[in-house]
Image (cartoon, rainbow, N blue to C red):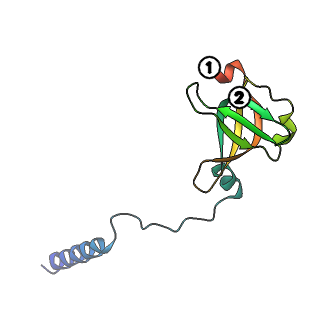
Amino acid sequence: MKKLALVFSLLVVAGLVYAQTPPYPQEQPPAKADPGMAKSEKTQQVEAEVVSVDATAKTITFKKDMGAEPQTLPVEGKALTALKDVMTGQKYRLVCKNDTAGGPKSIVDIKKTTAKDAHPQ
């Protein structure tokens, strides 16, 4: 009888301990962001057709889709060297730096798209 009482009391204690543990792991504070990760979150790639290029003002006007309104953005950084080779009517992959709202603020890199990029299979 003593053994049965001991086993029963151990089961009760184990049940109480189990009931005290949270059902889900508690949220941990976010770890410090990797500098490379922060950079990728602040840019976006846009497949677009170039409408016009103004090398003097260092801007490119482009359309994302056929029916979309043209958008003009300043060119900076590494994209400035590629600006002289950009032709109107051609499709490019523009790497845009985002503003605080997440919209494109400026073009930081320009890559010519290929037929393979335009129609992946």
User: Which amino acid lies under the numbered mark 1 shown in the image of this protein?
Assistant: His
Compared to 43, does 26 lie above or below?
below
Please tell me which residue is depicted at 61% across the width and 21% down the height of the picture.
Answer: 120
Asked whether, in this view, residue 102 is left or right of residue 80, the answer is left
Q: Say which label, 2 or 1, has the lower sequence index.
A: 2
| Residue placed most toward the observer, 60 or 36 | 60
Residue 5 at x, y percent in the picture: 16, 79
Q: Regarding mark 1 in the picture, which secondary structure is present there? A: loop
Please tell me which residue is depicted at 69% across the width and 40% down the height of the picture.
Answer: 72
Residue 96 at x, y percent in the picture: 69, 44
How packed mark 1 is, by other alpha carbons closer than 10 Å (few <14, some 14-19, many 20 or more), is few
Foreground: disc 2 or disc 1: 2
| Residue placed most toward the observer, 117 or 11 | 117
Residue 64 at x, y percent in the picture: 61, 31
Residue 111: mark in rendering: none
Q: Are marks 2 and 1 in contact (CB under 8 Å)?
A: no
Compared to 88, does 70 lie above or below?
below
Which residue is the extreme one toward the left?
1
Please tell me which residue is depicted at 66% across the width and 39% down the height of the picture.
Answer: 45
How packed mark 2 is, by other alpha carbons closer than 10 Å (few <14, some 14-19, many 20 or more), is some
Q: How much space separates mark 2 and mark 1, taking CA atoms?
A: 21 Å
Please tell me which residue is depicted at 69% across the width and 18% down the height of the picture.
Answer: 115
Residue 1 at x, y percent in the picture: 12, 78
Compared to 56, does 24 lie above or below?
below
Residue 119: mark in rendering: 1
Compared to 61, does 14 lie above or below?
below
User: Which amino acid lies under the numbered mark 2 shown in the image of this protein?
Assistant: Val
Q: Regarding mark 2 in the picture, which secondary structure is present there? A: strand
Residue 16 occupies quadrant: bottom left
Residue 51: mark in rendering: 2
